[in-house]
Image (cartoon, rainbow, N blue to C red):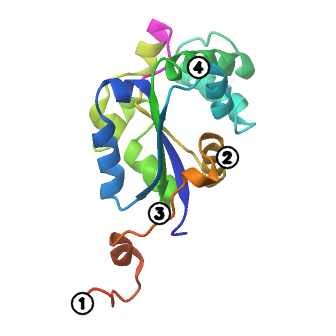
Amino acid sequence: MKNEKTLVVIKPDGIQRSLIGEVIRRYERAGLKLVGLKMVVPTADFVEKHYTVDPGWRMSNGEKTIKGYRDKGLTPPTEDPMEASGRTLEKLKQYMSSGPVIALVWQGVHAVKIVRKITGGTEPFTSDVGTIRGDLVLDSYQLADTDGRAVRNLIHASGSVDEANKEIALWFNEKEIINYRLVQEQILYDVNLDGILE
């Protein structure tokens, strides 16, 4: 459990708003260890591979999109989940390939869930205060739909351990994940705290 890893991608809007340090600081403060980091400009094809690394993502995303319209009393642009997710994917490809992103691998106990909690919900407008998206972004699905673009929510965070493992393997090779020790790990994980005093 202590070595669980998850992927975070700071999206182009996070880079352009100079929020890199703020994002990293929030995960570090929780006790997670940064074990991989790189800056790239992903191609549209790579972005598609990233979002479809989970074979069920297209159907799940499409169903969620259609439900989101209905929950707001709106008529969805399509009733076909695959068509709906195809539209979302095209917007994400344009958004994510528009400039540099920073891919990060975080390690620690419950890393996936801790990162998701700190990051906040997918829609910044409805994300809780105290989360990265809730504190630093004012975008909403409604505004994104009106503008015909992806919601700008600063960060991608893996949704499950399985998804994280697949995404990390897509973004990083084994040599780019660094295994090292932090002094704080003794405080977080040492059962007896018997290594503090000399």
Instruction: State the mark number for residue 197.
Output: 1
Instruction: Name the spot of residue 36 as percent of width and height, x first.
Output: 49, 50
**C-alpha span from label 4 to label 2:** 19 Å
Q: Which amino acid does label 1 sit on?
A: Leu
Instruction: State the mark number for residue 93.
Output: 4
- SS for tag 2? helix
Residue beneath the point at 45% across and 7% down = 147
In contact (CB < 8 Å): disc 3 and disc 2: no
Q: Which amino acid does label 2 sit on?
A: Lys
Residue beneath the point at 62% across and 43% down = 167
Could you tell me if residue 169 is visible in this image?
yes
**Which residue matches tag 2?**
166
- SS for tag 4? helix
| Rendering quarter of residue 195 | bottom left
Please name whichever residue, 9 or 117, is drawn nearer the observer in this view of the structure. 9
| Rendering quarter of residue 11 | top left
**C-alpha span from label 2 to label 1:** 41 Å
In contact (CB < 8 Å): disc 1 and disc 4: no
**Which residue matches tag 3?**
108
In primary-sequence order, the first of circles 1 and 4 is 4
**Mark 1 vs mark 3: in front:** 1
Instruction: Name the spot of residue 131 as percent of width and height, x first.
Output: 33, 43
Please name whichever residue, 74 or 114, is drawn nearer the observer in this view of the structure. 114
**What are the residue bounds of the magenta stretch?**
145-152
Instruction: Name the spot of residue 116 as percent of width and height, x first.
Output: 46, 47
In primary-sequence order, the first of circles 1 and 3 is 3
Q: What residue type is labelled 3?
A: Gly
Q: In this view, does 59 lie to the left or right of 36?
A: right
